[in-house]
Structure formats: C-alpha cells, structure tokens
Image (cartoon, grey):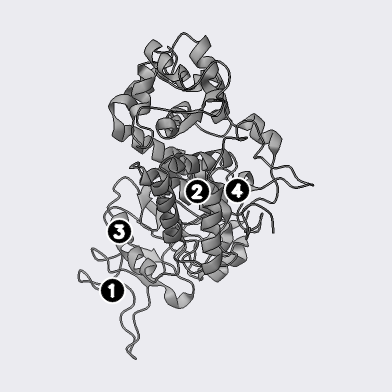
C-alpha cells in the first residue's frame, strides 16, 4: 500500500496516492503542549482552516486570539494560513500502531468514532481517531468540539483524526445514514415486539448472532436447497437455533423502506444487541456495512462452534481460534444468563456427573428423564428472562446446566473470574459488551465482497 500523505491538497490527492476513496480526511497536529497549533484538512484546498492560536505562534500575530497568517488581504479576503509541516504516514504504519485498529490499542468510544493509541516509528505518541462517515452536517460541527477535546490529551504530542469513506471497505456507525436512516428503529421495534411476545426469543436472537459470528456473514440464515447444504443442520445448530422468523420479519420491513440496502448480517448484529437490552442487559456501540455471504460451510459450523460437552481447554481453544482471550470467553459464556436448553444436551450431566448440586439435579430429572423428553426445556440459570450475573452465582453453587458451563468453575484457571462476575454485575456487563463488539467484527465481508441479500434465507 502506498503512503497516505496528509497534505493540504485534500481527499482527491489522497485518493491518487492510495487508491482509496476517502470522502474526507482531517488531521489534527499538536506540535507541542505549549503552542497547540492545529490544522484541519478538508475535501479541497478551499476547505483548509486554521484555528486561532492559544498564544502567538512562531512569527505569527502579536495578540492572543489573532488569526495567524500574513494578515488580511487588501481586498478583504480572509488571511491565508501559513504553511505547516505535516507528517507523511503510511497506512501500514497506521495499522501497525493501532494493531489494525484492534482491541489492544483501543482507548475508547466517542461520538462519530473510536480512539486508538500507539507510537509512531519516530517515537511520537499518537492518538488516532477513526471517524465514521456520515452525511450529517453535525459531523463538521462536532469535529470542532472533538478537536478541542484532543487538545486536552496531555500524554500525546500528536493526534491523528482520520475519516474513512464508506467505499473504503470499512464498517461505520453511520453506514446507512443516507441510504436507510430509520433502519435502527425498524430493527429495535421488531425485536422488542418479539421479546415482549416471548421472552425466550431474546436469548434465541443472541444465540443466532453468536453462531453466525464465527464469521459474521449471515451464512447461518441460508436454507438448504437441492444443490446447496447450509449450516442449519450442523450439530450445534440442528433443532436448536431459532428466531429465523423474526429476522425474516425485520428484513421484509427493511426491504419495504430501503430495498436492497441493509444486509442480513447487520440485522443479526443489531437484533442481538437489542435483544440483550430488551432483557435489561447492557448495550454496546455497533458499526455496520457487513455484507452477506453467498455460501456457507457445514463442516466449519461443526468444527468451529464450541460444544455443550466441551472441556475448559476445549472452550479456551475454540475461542482462541477466533481471536478471543480466556477472559473474553468467560464473559461471552455469560450469554447463558438468559434462555433455555433442551434435555438432550444436558442429560448426561444430570445422570453421570458428580460436580452438580444434588437437589438441582433431582429437580431437573423430573423434566429430563434418562430416556425420552429430548426437547423438554430447562433454564440456564434461575432468572432466564433477565440479563444479569445470576449465571455465575449458579456456577459457584454447582448449578451449571451444561457440562461446558460448569467447566468454567471446576477448580480450573477461570474460577477467579467467575467469582469476580458473581459479585460484580457491572464488571460482567462491561466485559460482555466489549467482547460482543469484538465478536460482531469477526471477519466481516465488506466493500464489494459478498452481496446484500433481499431474502435472508437465500442468495440473490
């Protein structure tokens, strides 16, 4: 990839240098803590602007607040800003210092974007803010306010603010701002209605997203055909996944408002978040722009998804293969604080395992006999319609429903984290939300990859 040159020639110049269609690029330079000289770059030379200095700049105006430059032109035109040296930074270096805009360098969320921290090769500390594209005029106004916030970052000598266009293949919180501005409310209303009718549906939609998002491409939604085998018949999915009808309803409503615009993968991501919120759980920030796969992999679904009979080492390995830490695995397992499971997946635990509370096992056996009743349901924890930390308390009491659940608290390396979550619901909620953000961004299809299905059950 060629260098991304931050220059006053604007996005057309950037496009020439990189081949990436940036709708706008803005750069904030803090030359030092004292001077706070800043400059922003817009889409053309006429959009260059300089802010009043906090003190007289190098050879600039003599009074505080006086615009720097060569002074007003005789014809009354605005003063022309003095040139300022700006860094040439390659996209490779941006990716390096931000760990490809990954979680290790992630500092936090703010309006219109996420902030990352790293060090340039020259040793300068940098805060990189990746702004989401938006057609809203509020973006320019908000940037000014965000720029002031950037001046308060005392630990950094350089702050880079980069806005990627929607055609660059990046996910964005405002991806549908112009093409389908009401898509969020359409999804939220449909999810709230479904969960209100059946609280269990919240857990089902969350699980649907989870089983898709070891890929995040809506492949799990594809029906089998005479010439195609999808993922619905995979061991972890067969006679288990549900909520497809809710996704169909949402898609139909969106196609009515914005035909061929919102992907099924983005619907799954938003519906999962809204489901957790509907059951009084945490919310998290989402980005959009995923595209839908045109194929699916039965074998991958069978091999990648963790099993209800997994050991602790198996769980750690399954999640690690997708880039998750052990702590993130324990947090994501907390999704079992809502919903129910079928007798067939926990029968062996009831009748053949010893690390189970005896009264708990006895109570479950009445609904899950040693033979028969495979589809009889039992809740994962004592409050299956409320997203809370009760799941972890139940594990400590040896009331984990699945073998894989109890493995998290069975004298192993994750016992301490289970204890932490059992006593601190806020910590669990925060960690769960952060892990869900990471999950939603696992290997999405973007740009021209895949397609936007008009019917989530089949390719176009």
Q: Which residue is mark 1?
A: 67
Question: 85 or 423, which lies in front?
Answer: 423
The span from disc 1 to disc 2 (Cα, nearest Å) is 47 Å
Label 3: few (<14), some or many (≥20) within 10 Å? many
| Apparent side of residue 194 relative to residue 452 in the rendered image (left or right) | left
Residue 431 higher or lower than 262, as above or below: above
| Apparent side of residue 114 relative to residue 444 in the rendered image (left or right) | left
Image spot of residue 18 (x, y percent): 60, 60
Quadrant of the frame with the C terminus: bottom right
- The numbered mark, 4 or 1, whose residue comes first in the sequence reads 1
- The numbered mark, 2 or 4, whose residue comes first in the sequence reads 4
Q: Is residue 125 at least partly visible in the picture?
A: no
Residue 218, labelled with which disc?
4
- The numbered mark, 1 or 3, whose residue comes first in the sequence reads 3
- The numbered mark, 1 or 2, whose residue comes first in the sequence reads 1
The span from disc 2 to disc 3 (Cα, nearest Å) is 40 Å
Q: Which residue is mark 3?
A: 36
- The numbered mark, 3 or 4, whose residue comes first in the sequence reads 3
The span from disc 4 to disc 1 (Cα, nearest Å) is 53 Å
Q: Is the residue under label 4 in contact with that under label 3 (CB below 8 Å)?
A: no
Query: Is disc 1 placed on a helix, strand or loop?
Result: loop
Camera-near label (1 vs 2) is 2
Question: 284 or 443, which lies in front?
Answer: 284
The span from disc 1 to disc 3 (Cα, nearest Å) is 14 Å
Q: Is residue 420 at least partly visible in the picture?
A: yes
Q: Which residue is mark 2?
A: 269
Label 4: few (<14), some or many (≥20) within 10 Å? many
- The numbered mark, 2 or 3, whose residue comes first in the sequence reads 3
The span from disc 2 to disc 4 (Cα, nearest Å) is 10 Å
């Amino acid at each position: 990839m060629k260098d991304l040159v931050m220059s006053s020639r604007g996005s057309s110049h950037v496009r020439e240098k990189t081949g990436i269609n940036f709708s706008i690029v803005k750069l904030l330079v803090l030359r030092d803590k004292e001077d706070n000289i800043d400059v922003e770059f817009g889409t053309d030379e006429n959009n260059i602007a300089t802010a009043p200095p906090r003190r007289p700049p190098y050879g600039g105006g003599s009074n505080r607040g006086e615009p720097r430059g060569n002074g007003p032109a005789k014809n009354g035109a605005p003063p022309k800003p003095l040139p300022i040296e700006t860094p040439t930074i390659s996209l490779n270096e941006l990716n390096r210092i931000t760990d490809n805009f990954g979680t290790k360098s992630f500092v936090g969320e703010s309006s219109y974007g996420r902030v990352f921290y790293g060090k340039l090769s020259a040793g300068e500390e940098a805060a990189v803010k990746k702004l989401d594209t938006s057609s809203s005029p509020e973006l320019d106004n908000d940037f000014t306010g965000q720029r002031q916030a950037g001046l308060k970052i005392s630990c950094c000598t350089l702050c880079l603010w980069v806005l990627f266009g929607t055609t660059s293949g990046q996910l964005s919180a405002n991806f549908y701002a112009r093409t389908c501005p009401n898509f969020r409310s359409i999804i939220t209303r449909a999810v709230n209605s479904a969960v209100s009718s059946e609280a269990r549906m919240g857990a089902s939609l969350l699980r649907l997203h989870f089983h898709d998002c070891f890929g995040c491409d809506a492949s799990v939604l594809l029906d089998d055909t005479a010439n195609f085998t999808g993922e619905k018949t995979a061991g972890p999915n067969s006679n288990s996944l549900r909520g497809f009808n809710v996704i169909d309803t949402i898609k139909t409503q969106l196609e009515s408002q914005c035909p061929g615009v919102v992907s099924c993968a983005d619907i799954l991501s938003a519906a999962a978040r809204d489901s957790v919120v509907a059951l009084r759980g945490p919310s998290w920030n989402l980005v959009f722009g995923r595209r839908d796969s045109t194929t699916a992999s039965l074998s991958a679904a069978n091999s990648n998804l963790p099993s209800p009979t997994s050991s602790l080492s198996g769980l750690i390995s399954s999640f690690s293969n997708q880039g998750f830490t052990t702590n993130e695995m324990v947090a994501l397992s907390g999704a079992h604080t809502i919903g129910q499971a079928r007798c067939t997946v926990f029968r062996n635990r009831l009748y053949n395992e010893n690390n189970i509370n005896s009264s708990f096992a006895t109570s479950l056996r009445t609904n899950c006999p040693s033979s028969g009743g495979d589809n009889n349901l039992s809740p994962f924890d004592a409050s299956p319609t409320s997203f809370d930390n009760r799941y972890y308390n139940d594990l400590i009491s040896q009331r984990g429903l699945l073998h894989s659940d109890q493995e998290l608290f069975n004298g192993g390396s994750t016992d301490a984290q289970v204890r932490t979550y059992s006593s601190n619901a806020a910590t669990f909620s925060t960690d769960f939300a952060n892990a869900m953000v990471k999950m939603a961004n696992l290997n999405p299809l973007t740009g021209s990859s895949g397609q936007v299905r008009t019917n989530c059950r089949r390719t176009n």
